[in-house]
Image: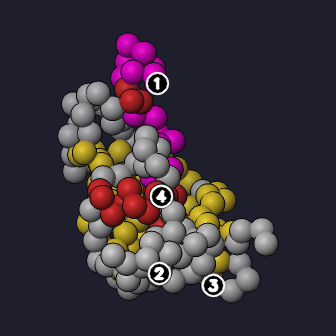
Amino acid sequence: MPNPHDFHAPQSSYSKEDLLKSSEGGYFGPGNAQLPAPPMLMMDRITEISVGGGQFGKGHIVGELDLTPSHWFFDCHCPGDPVMPGCLGLDAMWQMIGYWLGWSGSPGKGRAVGVGEVELRGHITPDIRRVRYEVDMRQVRRGRLVLGIANGRVLADDSCVYVAKDMRVGLTMPAV
């Protein structure tokens, strides 16, 4: 059995089991990027991840969430008018940018540091079966400051419902 503190060999896609392992920490080495644990883990799988490609040729990542009417946020956000909060779609894309930074070799823990613009074009309701997040890395800075800047979109059963530009995630190093 491999040591859980060994660095992870990058893959081109990840299952739910893989993402859950990442939420436990140490997937990219101790103190490095990890995804949140459920219920804040906003994806069931990563279907594509690359260092090249995407709209800007600097990398991309695609994740999916299988949705059911029983998801936790439908009962507590707007009771009587169930809708997935827009902030959760944005958070999912921030999660993916931080994950991409760790996956591509940068040390540190991901922290959302901003977004330039978010446009909500629709809603995610209990009748939606799949949410897809598509993120294209626009700029990556690696040095004393590790920063990923990306554009993304959220699709509900293949219909675009959110667009975000200039999402920023930085990596912080743990205090020594």
Residue 51 drawn in magenta: no
Q: Cβ–Cβ below 8 Å for labels 4 and 1?
A: no
Q: Nearer the viewer, residue 25 or 56?
A: 25
The disc, 4 or 1, on the residue closer to the chain's N-terminal end is 4
Q: Residue furthest top?
A: 80
Q: Residue 51's x, y, as percent?
A: 40, 83
- What's under tag 4, amino acid-wise? Glu
- What's under tag 1, amino acid-wise? His
Whole-Å distance between the Cαs marked 4 and 1? Answer: 27 Å
> Where 67 sits versus 151, above or below?
above
> Where 103 sits versus 118, above or below?
below
> Where 141 sits versus 20, above or below?
below
Whole-Å distance between the Cαs marked 3 and 2? Answer: 19 Å
Q: Residue 63's x, y, as percent?
A: 33, 59
User: For the point 29% across and 56% down, which residue is it?
Assistant: 16
Whole-Å distance between the Cαs marked 4 and 2? Answer: 14 Å
Please give the residue where the numbered disc 3 appears in the rendered image: 142
- Region rendered in magenta: 75-92
- What's under tag 3, amino acid-wise? Arg
